[in-house]
Amino acid sequence: MSTIFSKIINGDIPCYKIAEDDRFFAFLDINPLVKGHTLVVPKQETDYLFDLDDNLLADMNVFAKKIAVAQKQVIDCKRVGVAVLGLEVPHAHIHLIPMNSEADINFRNPKLELSADEFEAIAKAIREQVRI
């Protein structure tokens, strides 16, 4: 059975896509902690991040770095934080979260409610900066 992330990758569920290549896909989290909160996933459906092949895991981090560099150019933040939780969806993923303080990456914080237009504007701005 496909995960929700596989359905997003396949286009069965809409998303605010940031970037993709032949092995990875990045899109905005629809329940963001902050503006620009992005998920990076491998197209290969694997439950646990550290079950990925070493080369795929390394390349996923390089792909994520390219997204984080683009986020930093668009979102007013000091850094882009990285979080790996992986319990809510059985598909390996990395959260890239623009942050100005450690409080910005607290998953207990209320999630932002953004309009479709706001999501699309953020995705477009980041997408235009990504160099894949």
Image (tube, rainbow, N blue to C red):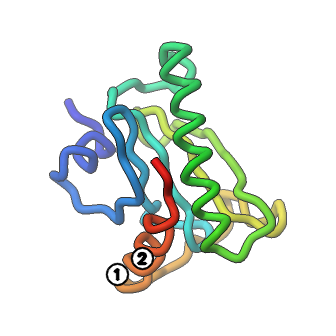
Q: Quadrant of residue 94?
A: top right
Q: Quadrant of residue 119?
A: bottom left
**Percent position of residue 15, x then y:** 31, 62
Q: Alpha-carbon neighbours of circle 2 within 10 Å: few (<14), some, or many (≥20)?
A: many
The one nearer the camera, 119 or 47, is: 119
Which residue is at 49% across, 39% downward? 93
**Percent position of residue 100, x then y:** 80, 69
Which residue is at 34% across, 81% downward? 116
- The secondary element bearing badge 2 is classed as helix
21 with respect to 8 (left or right): right
Return the residue at label 1: 116
Q: Is residue 70 above or below residue 45?
A: below
Circles 1 and 2: CB atoms closer than 8 Å: yes
What's the residue type where badge 2 is placed?
A: Phe
Image quarter of the N terminus: top left
Disc 1 versus disc 2: distance between alpha carbons?
5 Å
Return the residue at label 2: 119
Quick one: which residue is furthest to the left in this view? 12
Which residue is at 49% across, 53% downward? 131
66 with respect to 18 (left or right): right
**Percent position of residue 114, x then y:** 46, 82
Which residue is at 50% across, 16% downward? 51
- The secondary element bearing badge 1 is classed as helix
